[in-house]
Image (tube, grey):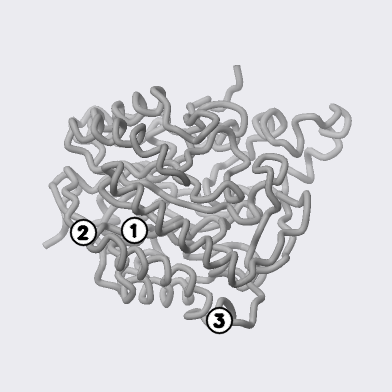
Amino acid sequence: MKPSIFEPSSIAGMTLKNRFIRSATHESMADEHGTPTDALEKLYIRLAEGGVGAIITGYAGVQQDGKSSLLRMLMIDTDELIPAYRNLTDRIHEYGTPVILQIAHCGRQTRRAVTGHPTVAPSPIDDFIFHEETPHELDNRGIEAIIESFVSAAERAKKAGFDGIQLHLAHGYLLSQFLSDHTNRRRDKWGGSTVNKLRIVSEIINRIRQTIGNYPVLAKINAFDNRKGGMRVEEAVEIARLLEHHGCDAIEISSGVVEDGLAIMRGSHPPMEALFKSSFRFNNMPTLMKTVASPFIHFAMRSPKPLHGYNLEAAQSIKKAVSIPVITVGGLHDLSDISAALENGSTDYVSMSRPFIIEPNIVRKFQDGAQTASRCIMCNYCALMIEVDTVKCYYGRLP
């Protein structure tokens, strides 16, 4: 039987009202300690009231040296944060909506100027965007500490009432860096083969199971990127198989790293105005230099094609290789495209980010027949302006 997009279903014991999931989106709605704020609670309540099947939070940092360079990142690195998260999850659960905490370490995709710590990575490979310093190569002790930080974060998530966690293995952050030959040049037990590159993740999952038992653990992975020696679909399929083998409960399929420009969140026109206003690389650049640099930046930021449903083909390949649920994100804004993706077996669930920014109640609108497509114009101003402000829709215009 083909899955119905508006019928209840379950993932690892979590009951979802439908097959729409709010994909993890950095909201810039934490305080200086990484504690969720009232603004974040109000946003999640709007999503829950709007009919979403489940909410995956913006990424929460497991260590201070892995904190995002974006504004006001959530953190989950200390027990003192648990009560605030418990208040948040209790409020969301009033609407019968599962909420999953995405946990992450940014690795080389952050800055010492923000974290106060040296950047770290599997190998000392400079990042094109975050290149204030060459990242320090993690030794065994550092890797073990990060594994334990992820496990502790999962323990805190459970105590805080989250229905599960999602490990962020995508978009060029630390765990993604271990999985890619572009950023992992190691020849020890943490690099080389796919099994070795995944070892940090498999250790995290295995130790979570040993520590807190049968608790939902999801993962977000890259199916591919545009880096030389980076992720390709064939290896992503093998990674998905290994994740299932180690007890992962569901896999969300995405693509691209920050160095790829607008490969993660595609759009027809590079958002130059937002880039120059928000990015630490450009916001203090003299006007003349911006004028000279604009054509080159515009070229570097252009989105690959297609602009819609660009991860579905890879998701279908992965779905054929695993028996756990597959979730797909990326340019899925039209109800007919979403329904077709479920009916033809490309994916089990659809996750969205930008459509929920402009319309937190879009699932309700779909279900009531009020509209059949998101109003999002894919300008990507929202994706860039979170470096200086809370997440919101700009609809292609800055105030």
> Residue 243 placed where, x, y %?
37, 71
Cβ atoms at labels 1 and 2 below 8 Å apart: yes
Q: Residues within 10 Å of mark 3 (few under 14, many from 20)?
A: some
**Between residues 300 and 201, which one lies in front from this camera angle?**
201
Residue 126 found in image quarter: bottom right
Q: CA distance from mark 3 to mark 2?
A: 31 Å
Cβ atoms at labels 3 and 2 below 8 Å apart: no
Dot 3 amino acid type = Lys
Residue drawn at 58 percent across, 46 percent down:
64
Q: CA distance from mark 1 to mark 3?
A: 24 Å
Q: Quadrant of the N terminus?
A: bottom left
Q: Secondary structure at mark 1?
A: strand
**Between residues 182 and 272, which one lies in front from this camera angle?**
182
The residue pinned by badge 3 equals: 189
Dot 2 amino acid type = Ala
**Between residues 302 and 177, which one lies in front from this camera angle?**
177
The residue pinned by badge 2 equals: 12
Among numbered discs 3 and 2, the one appearing first in the sequence: 2
> Residue 54 placed where, x, y %?
27, 43
Q: Residues within 10 Å of mark 2 (few under 14, many from 20)?
A: some
Q: Secondary structure at mark 3?
A: loop
- Residue 335 seen anywhere in this rendered image of the structure: no
Q: Residue furthest front?
A: 80
The residue pinned by badge 1 equals: 218
Residue 375's place in the image compared with 7, above or below, is above
- Residue 9 seen anywhere in this rendered image of the structure: yes
Q: Secondary structure at mark 2?
A: loop
